[in-house]
Amino acid sequence: MSSGVLVAAVAGSLALATTIGVAAPIARPTPPQGVQQSSVPQGDPVAGISCDAMEGMKIHIHQHLVLLDHGKPLLIPNNVGRPMMRQCLYWVHTHTPDGIIHIESPAMRTFTLGEFFTIWGQPLTRTQASSMKSDKGAPLKVWVNGKPYTGDPRKIQLTAHADVVIEAGPPYPKPPKFTNWGTL
């Protein structure tokens, strides 16, 4: 192969790669105001959860998370668990900004809400979830599958179709029940 043909082949490959990258960009989550991008994991394992090139197939389950800050919904962004610096996907992630958490893992194990928040790069304590805090340091109100939860929210297990609502208030509206599991 002549050097001119080789140069043309390399240039064509680079043009194709650039076109594909421009034609199908991946929207990355933007940290909420006041959250440093450096707190978001960039592909290193988190609590034994890898960031892999493909989704795992041993476990494929979904959960729903709602955050209510004094009665107003707080967005859980799309593509949590998809680092900006690497082309990989954590086993616990989001695809869309609808509160659906996806667990697609090559390993059989239990996952927790705390692991999701760590991958998201957000705090989760009894008094704070992401950027929302209850008034005067009061504990957050947490609901799991419609029932009050008083334990450490980081330890909530992400089981199939778990419906988690976290509220900072007041007010504390009745937690909405998620029923739109469709094909999830």
Image (cartoon, grey):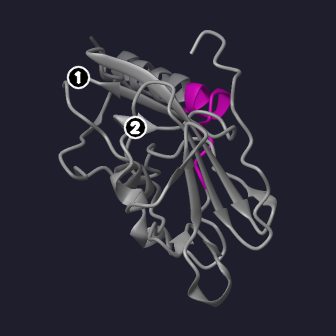
Q: Secondary structure at mark 1?
A: loop
Q: Which residues are magenta?
A: 18-29
- Residue at image location 70% in from the left, 53% down from the top: 75
* Residue that mark 1 sits on: 106
Residue on which the image places disc 2: 158
Judge from the rendering whether residue 17 lies leftward or rightward of residue 146; answer left or right: left
* Residue 164 can be seen, yes or no: yes
Left or right of 138 on screen, residue 48: left
Disc 2 crowd, CA 10 A, few/some/many (<14, 14-19, 20+): many
> Which is more toward the observer, 137 or 102?
137
The residue at 43%/49% (across/down) is 83
Q: Which one is in front, 80 or 38?
A: 80
Residue 154 location (% of width, % of height): 37, 58
Q: Position of residue 90 (x, y in %)?
A: 35, 39
- Report which quarter residue 18 is drawn in: top right
Q: Quadrant of residue 157?
A: top left
Instruction: Say which amino acid is labelled 1.
Output: Pro
Residue 82: x, y in percent? 45, 43
| In the image, residue 14 above or below residue 90 | above
Q: Nearer the viewer, residue 26 or 7?
A: 26
